[in-house]
C-alpha cells in the first residue's frame, strides 16, 4: 500500500505516504480525502513521508528550483535511491489542488508535513507556511517528527474552536 489515512483523531487526519503514487493510487487518495471532507466542519491534516531513502538524497536532488516540474522523468542519484516520477501524477495533483483549495481555505485549521530528513526540514521549515499556504490555501508547518506535527495541529484546532 502506498499510503494510509489514520482517522483516530478525527477531525485531524494523518496521511502516511510509503511510496511514490501511481495514477491509480492518487485517484484513490483523492476519493478518500473527498470522503473525509464531505462531513463538513473544521479539520487538520498531517502528512508524514515514510518512504525509504537516505538523508543525502536532499543534497543530491535539490536543484534550487522549487517550481521545477519533475513529472516526466526518473532520476537516480549516486547512492542507489531511485525516485520514480509517474507521468501525469504532478499534473493530476495540481488540478486536484486547484479544485479543492476553496474547501481547504474555508475549514482547514492547519496542514503539517513531516519528514525524517533533517537537512530537508532545516532548509524548508522557514518557508513551509508560505509553500503550504500557496498549495493548499491553509496555514502550514514542517516538522521532523509526527508528535510535534500533531501537537501543532491540535493547538490550531483548539484556537479555532475558542
Image (cartoon, grey):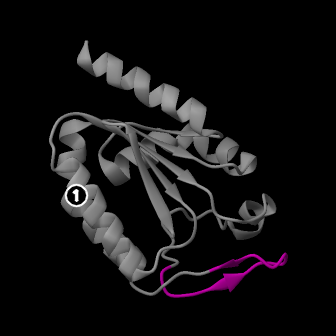
Q: Which residues are magenta?
A: 71-83
Does residue 22 appear left or right of residue 103 in this picture? Answer: right
Does residue 8 appear left or right of residue 122 in this picture? Answer: left
User: On the image, which quarter does residue 138 sit in?
Assistant: top left
On the image, numbered disc 1 is attached to which residue? Answer: 34
Q: Residue 131: percent from the left, percent from the top? A: 45, 49
Residue drawn where x is 43% and y is 30% of the image: 153
Q: Secondary structure at mark 1?
A: helix
Judged from this view, the residue extending furthest toward the front is: 8
Q: Residue 59: percent from the left, percent from the top? A: 76, 62
Residue drawn where x is 32% and y is 17% of the image: 159
Does residue 89 appear left or right of residue 33 in this picture? Answer: right
Judged from this view, the residue extending furthest toward the right is: 79
Quadrant where the C terminus sits is top left
Q: Who is closer to the viewer here, 62 or 116?
A: 116
Q: Residues within 10 Å of mark 1 (few under 14, many from 20)?
A: few
User: On the image, which quarter does residue 126 sit in?
Assistant: top right
Residue drawn where x is 69% and y is 49% of the image: 116
Q: Residue 77: percent from the left, percent from the top? A: 77, 78
The rendered magenta stretch, by its main secondary structure, is classed as: loop
Q: Who is closer to the viewer here, 124 or 81?
A: 81
Q: Is residue 75 magenta?
A: yes
Q: Is residue 162 magenta?
A: no
User: On the image, which quarter does residue 27 sit in?
Assistant: bottom left
Residue drawn where x is 70% and y is 65% of the image: 52
Amino acid at each position: 500500500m502506498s499510503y494510509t489515512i489514520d482517522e483516530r483523531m478525527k477531525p485531524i487526519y494523518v496521511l502516511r505516504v510509503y511510496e511514490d503514487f501511481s495514477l491509480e493510487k492518487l485517484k484513490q487518495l483523492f476519493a478518500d480525502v473527498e470522503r473525509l471532507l464531505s462531513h463538513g466542519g473544521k479539520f487538520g491534516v498531517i502528512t508524514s513521508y515514510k518512504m525509504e531513502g537516505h538523508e543525502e538524497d536532499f543534497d543530491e536532488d535539490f536543484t534550487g528550483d522549487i517550481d521545477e516540474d519533475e513529472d516526466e522523468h526518473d532520476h537516480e542519484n549516486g547512492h542507489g535511491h531511485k525516485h520514480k516520477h509517474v507521468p501525469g501524477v504532478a499534473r493530476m495533483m495540481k488540478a486536484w489542488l486547484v479544485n479543492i483549495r476553496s474547501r481547504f481555505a474555508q475549514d482547514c485549521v492547519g496542514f503539517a508535513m513531516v519528514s525524517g530528513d533533517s537537512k530537508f526540514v532545516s532548509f524548508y521549515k522557514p518557508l513551509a507556511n508560505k509553500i503550504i499556504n500557496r498549495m493548499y490555501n491553509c496555514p502550514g508547518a514542517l516538522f521532523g517528527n509526527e508528535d510535534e506535527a500533531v501537537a501543532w495541529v491540535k493547538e490550531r484546532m483548539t484556537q479555532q474552536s475558542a
